[in-house]
Amino acid sequence: MSYKVKLNFFEGPLDLLLFLIKKERIDVYDIPISRITEQYLAYMELLQLLDLDIAGEFLVMAATLMHIKSRMLLPPDESQEDEVGEEDPRDELVRKLLEYKKYKEAASCLQEMRDASKEIFLRTGKDGNEKIFAEENGDYFEASLFDLISAFRKVLKDIPKHTFHNVIKDKVTVADKIHAIYHILAEQEKVFFSALFTGAADKDEVIATFLAVLELIKMREVIVLQKGSFGEIEILRNPELAKQG
């Protein structure tokens, strides 16, 4: 894909690690480093496949995880067995994760306090303007970038099961998919993320569709909501723009 989305809402490597720890139901104090490294590198491959701008700290974290993994594979240092105890190679990473998690939770609490009198709850983030709506059947919250990538990963895994159309047609572009999503949301209030990929002809079309979603989020044309952790993602037009016509 020659199309590149430059994201201004990109989350960092610690966000990805916390996402994976929660998704895999891992104890942050006892991280299975081989498993989490494998998951982290898999998500890095997806980011590279999508040609997204990957900040240097993502690569640094990948190297850090692999270094910790290699240290844990080494036999214990017998010369330090009688001392206070050799530090677990994961300790520094755990401290960073816990500190970052506290920071995020504190920021979220301040955000909720600020908006406590409103009927609309805002998600903490760089923009601070993404709206999260509460419905009668439960609260929805904004899906993170990694929630989207996780859902996209599932779509990619399902590609071999699809029966692709054996027809020759022009290459689908991200712009084409942006217009297609606009058309869908003009006819209906919201659409499930997975439904956007129904009938995709090939892997390139799947990638173009996902990049179109990211571009629309960046443009603040749509918002993505999720009911419950790792629930089905829904996409709807930004109501603030809808009010403007």
Image: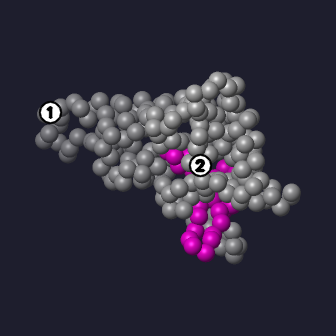
Q: Which residue is rendered at x = 75% and y = 47% of the image?
A: 182
**Residue tagged by mark 1?**
79
Q: Quadrant of residue 67?
A: top left
Which amino acid, by three-letter code, is at mark 1? Ser
Residue 56, image x, y percentages: 55, 30
For disc 1, the neighbor class at 10 Å (few under 14, some 14 to 19, many from 20) is: few
**Residue tagged by mark 2?**
195
Which amino acid, by three-letter code, is at mark 2? Ala
At numbered mark 2, what does the secondary structure look like: helix, strand or loop? helix
Magenta includes 143? yes
Q: Quadrant of residue 170?
A: top right
Magenta extent: 122-151
For disc 2, the neighbor class at 10 Å (few under 14, some 14 to 19, many from 20) is: few
Asked if residue 128 shows in the view, the reply is no
Residue 221, image x, y percentages: 75, 49
Q: Alpha carbon of mark 1 to alpha carbon of mark 2: how far?
A: 59 Å
Left or right of 49: which side holds 240? Answer: right
Q: Which residue is rendered at x = 64% and y = 54% of the image?
A: 191
